[in-house]
Amino acid sequence: MSDSSLRHRMGRATLVVRGPDRRPLADQVVTVAQQRHSFAFGNIGFDFVGLVGGPEPEAAADVEGFGGTNDGDLERLGDLWLNLFNTATLPFYWGRYEPRRGVTDAERLTKTARWFAERGVTVKGHPLVWHTVQPPWLLDLDLDEVERLLRARIRDLVGGFAGLIDVWDAINEAVIMPVFENGDNAITRLARARGRIYLVRMAFEEARAANPAATLVLNDFDLSSAYECLIEGLLEAGVGIDAIGLQTHMHQGYRGEEYMQRMLDRFARYGLPLHLTETTLVSGHLMPPHIEDLNDYQIPDWPTTAEGEARQAAELVRHYRSLVAHPAVQSINYWGLTDHGAWLGAPAGLVRADGSRKPSYDALEALINGEWWLPPTDMRTDADGTVAVEGFLGDYTVSVGDRTERFTLGPTQTTATVDLD
Amino acid sequence: MSDSSLRHRMGRATLVVRGPDRRPLADQVVTVAQQRHSFAFGNIGFDFVGLVGGPEPEAAADVEGFGGTNDGDLERLGDLWLNLFNTATLPFYWGRYEPRRGVTDAERLTKTARWFAERGVTVKGHPLVWHTVQPPWLLDLDLDEVERLLRARIRDLVGGFAGLIDVWDAINEAVIMPVFENGDNAITRLARARGRIYLVRMAFEEARAANPAATLVLNDFDLSSAYECLIEGLLEAGVGIDAIGLQTHMHQGYRGEEYMQRMLDRFARYGLPLHLTETTLVSGHLMPPHIEDLNDYQIPDWPTTAEGEARQAAELVRHYRSLVAHPAVQSINYWGLTDHGAWLGAPAGLVRADGSRKPSYDALEALINGEWWLPPTDMRTDADGTVAVEGFLGDYTVSVGDRTERFTLGPTQTTATVDLD
């Protein structure tokens, strides 16, 4: 299914460039420049919640996190982030979002989401339903009450953030949810009592009702046949999945192109877009292979190394190339920008804890902003004022002097008239 | 969920024993004896197809088998088999059942099924749909034709054997079916094109239509969350599963009571009977743990050893005890009686290749026909001619002199009148 020519990522347009008098600008040099990828190159924006939104609510620190720090320099980190990514995932883990019942982190997250949105970044919320990072107070309630509160939480979040956040991981890790054994929690109890399909349907239906325009993602780390079976059951049950989320935290090593292609082919056969929601590659030693739940590997110090950084950069390029080559893949979300505050303390960032770029950052930049990007390019219109543009799907500008107009390269060849006023 | 007191396996009845004149036989010694277990203690009857039915059809030998030999002594093997088991699984692998299109093994299998049925044995057919052991001629056909033939095969088998065989593994190993990679076959192609739920539904619906009274089993070796997800999807889709089949081929070692109890609890929560359809424990060295598909381990000689036989016997007792203790378990089917012709050449039999009993045979006999069995027992009726009987669920006789009557101990306490004519 993959196509390394990436022709499925390219668009073509014939532009008719007209001047302020609406007459074609014949035989004229115009400058065409890409402004944004259609493909979602994402990262988590957890660090920015503290930097933009301020200190976290009381009691949140008692609940585990999944990456993100509250200190650092907003401008410096922001530049590094915005230089590469166009999609930000923000954390809505119930336990940290509402550590005390009724007291939520909505204000900080609204500020942070706005900060990203104002900079042209698509914001995604993660996750509406999950068994990990639960508020402690939920454990005391009976399951009917848990379900009622969970439904209310979904409606409140998805409805409340509609327009600002229109992409959600509706439910996270439903495969293991009812049989999860790494800590008692109310959501596992609920999933065991109600069944996976019931819970997934509940998440999607409540979210859909609260924001019919939302893109709702089913997300899992289990990429085995179990996930296939779950998806087939959900599709059979008519649950409205917009995208299949595939985690690829590779703290135990890059799994290779062959694995990825076969895995993508298996999930692509459902005809839904594939979102690589969580991807990591470490630039230090690898986590031992016998660890089953990555959360079980906690060490005081996990350093980045020169050798590890070279490996991470090379593997990151291979990984992104293989994913972008598969037509079903619609987004890749890397899990963390800097090693400072990274999930599990792993050196999984593209930037070191001191804020300096790793080779992986530069390598990813060379793809996203280099090989897969049309920089400002001079082109000459023909006698009819037309110019043919080919480039990666996305938003572009065409300029003559100080006059600039925007156009979009979509998946079907278009003819567009660009009026430079 | 388990209860080692086995009270869920016991029945109680108050018998009113009457003589030929229909008057209660007061203060009289009667002999009560168990005749049959309600619990299905089964084994495959593959060896008997050749012994009872005669030589296999031409070309069948070109297709792999899963245990069973054509030589041996029917009477001797029959006695060993019938002494322990009340349920026989017969092979209906498509590739061996119909090695040439239109030429089936129906006659031999009918003879063999009758041989068992005449001896009070319940006969089960295995399996209607599976991707392994496919007829070579199927690979040349397009998928619509494969589906048509598969539907016809299910109807022909289930309808044709109705009354003689009323229990079927409707579909085998659907979890891996669409992604099976150990050999190209038409059923994997079909499953990949149509989806698991479609194929399972097809199997159950065709079989149900052909024999509404049949017990139809979903069977798998994958006991992970994948199977849970498949089952949940099927139940959501309304597929009429009568029992969940759980394979436990333990060539790589006994998995222990704790594993079994948790596994049984996970599948018991669907409220369906659990059939332990395929269980084996070897009495030689264990298969190395790195082997994923047991079929990939083929060695010229896999001997039974004294040490292995002692281990097999001890583990078999532990295994059967833990399964019988779980109320959801309705049957245990051991996979093979003798090492001669055993699947994979493994010393998994309860009888050595030379026909002598292993300790495992004796140990299983001590459970099935000993600890869990009511042997002929003298009891005295009271002044009203009644006697209270408690024993394992099953069929019993009560006798006075040469007069004998049958009664059944069912799950609810009953009062039965037994007339000795």
Image: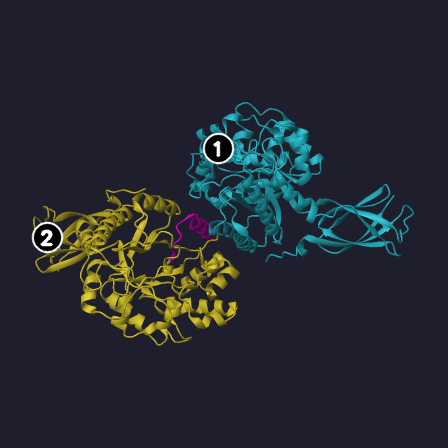
Chain colours: A yellow, B cyan
| Image-based side of A99 in relation to B279, left or right | left
Q: Is residue A43 magenta?
A: no
**What is the number of callouts on the image?**
2
Residue, disc 1:
B145
The residue tagged 2 is: A30
Is B396 placed left or right of B175 in the picture? right
Q: Secondary structure at mark 1?
A: helix
Mark in the foreground, 1 or 2? 1
Q: Which residues are the magenta region?
A: A217-236
Q: Main secondary structure of the magenta part?
A: helix
Let me know if residue A220 is in the magenta part: yes
Horizontal relation, residue B329 to residue A121: left or right: right
Question: A170 and B55: which one is in front?
Answer: B55
| Image coords of residue B116 (percent x, y) | 68, 35
Whether pointer 1 and pointer 2 mark residues with C-beta atoms closer than 8 Å, the reply is: no
In this rendering, position of residue B85 left or right of residue B295: right
Measuring from the top left, give residue A173's x and y in whole percent. 41, 57
Residue type at numbered disc 2 = Val
Q: Position of residue A97 (x, y in %)?
A: 37, 70
Say what amino acid the circle numbered 1 marks: Glu
Residue B63 in the image: above or below residue B179: above
Q: Are marks 1 and 2 on the same chain?
A: no
Determine the chain carrying the residue at label 1. B
The numbered mark at residue B52 is none
Give the percent coordinates (x, y) of residue A247: 35, 54
- Disc 2 is placed on an element classified as strand
The image shows residue A98, relative to residue A339, as above or below, that is below
Q: Is residue A323 above or below residue B162?
A: below
Residue B163 seen anywhere in this rendered image of the structure: no
Image quarter where the N terminus of chain B lies is: bottom right
